[in-house]
Image (cartoon, rainbow, N blue to C red):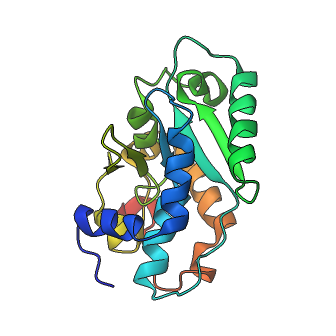
Amino acid sequence: MKIENERDMIRLVKEDKWMMDILHHVQTLQLPDWWVCAGFVRSKVWDALHGFTLRTPLPDVDVIYFDNLNLDEANEKQLEQRLKQLDTSIPWSVKNEARMHVANNIPPYSSSVDAISKFPETATALGLSLDEQGEVVLAAPCGIKDVLGLNVRPTPYFKQTDERTKMYEERIRKKNWVRTWYRINIIPVHQA
């Protein structure tokens, strides 16, 4: 399948019943500013670009939302339990980005998309949601060029400090994505 733009990425998702089921499950929670993000999106695109017929297993399905009115972490765990009741086979992970700046020791995010823009890699800084009409919406604050080009590079945010650069490099080493997606290019930080 040829994937050249955002429209192609959305079509890829819409044709995937498993992904659409997940988006519909999350939509039932009626969370503010919600997205299913990161590897959920990136892995699907990379699997398609590699011609894989089987889905690469995900360690988790990241669900984020932005709610300044309820910053209690226990609420996130309750939401995970509600999602598990809808589908026990999914490794749900739910986070309220309105409180994650505390865990990450950084200034507060302004929205879920702002949080996505500060994910480690541009190819992972992606989110999917459903609008009021049930249409798939893609958030790509760092663009889609890298995910489509099979390039792994740090987001601008992760290039800002030596500490974050080291975190990025360690993450890339641990993930070892090249083992699964052999065509990806890891762009060294000094060239990114």
Q: Quadrant of residue 109?
A: top left
Q: Residue furthest top?
A: 69
Query: Quadrant location of the N terminus?
Result: bottom left
Q: Residue at x 68, y 43 (%)?
A: 83
Q: Residue at x 54, y 57 (%)?
A: 21
In depth, the one of 120 and 34 nearer the eye is 34
Tell me if I can see residue 44 in this picture.
yes
Q: Residue at x 40, y 55 (%)?
A: 122
In depth, the one of 71 and 122 nearer the eye is 71
Q: How many marks?
A: 0
Query: Quadrant location of the C terminus?
Result: bottom left
* x, y percent for residue 184: 46, 78
**Is residue 133 shown left or right of residue 114?**
left
Q: Quadrant of residue 60?
A: bottom right
* x, y percent for residue 34: 47, 36
Tell me if I can see residue 139 in this picture.
no
**Is residue 138 shown left or right of residue 37?**
left
